Image (cartoon, rainbow, N blue to C red):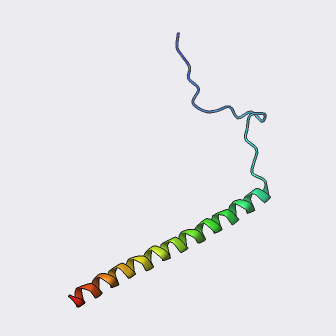
Amino acid sequence: MSKIEKTAPDTDASSATPAVPADDKSDLASAARKSAGKAAWTGAAVGIGSAAIVAALLYTRKRS
């Protein structure tokens, strides 16, 4: 006797996942925009901090 394995999920209408409503899509889009904005601010802060460290190191090298 052979054993049959199921490789794909059932696609019955009762077990299928419902589509995302339009208002949920707009919420996802606004959340993506907010998180992208936060990432940009974080990247800018890291860049400014790095530049400040480099400037401080160059300044201390000149003074000594």
Q: Residue furthest left?
A: 64
Total number of numbered discs in the rendering: 0
Residue in the foreground of this view, choosing between 23 and 18? 23
In this picture, is 35 found above or below 5?
A: below
Instruction: Name the residue: 48% across, 72% down.
Output: 43
Instruction: Pick whichever, 19 or 5, lies toward us.
Output: 19
For residue 56, side relative to residue 45 (left or right)? left
For the residue pair 42 and 17, the one nearer the viewer reads as 42
Q: Is residue 48 left or right of residue 21?
A: left
| Residue found at the very far top of the displayed protein | 1
User: Residue 20 at x, y = what percent?
Assistant: 75, 51
Residue 41, x across and y down, in percent:
54, 74
Residue 31 figure quarter: bottom right
Q: Picture coordinates of residue 47 (x, y %)?
A: 43, 77
Quadrant where the C terminus is found in the figure: bottom left
Residue 30 higher or lower than 53, as above or below: above
Q: Residue at x 58, y 69 (%)?
A: 38
Query: Which of the pair 48/27 is nearer the observer?
Result: 48
Residue sticking out furthest to the front: 64
Q: Quadrant of residue 13?
A: top right
Is 49 displayed left or right of 15 in the figure?
left
Please name the residue shown 68% across and 31% down the image.
10
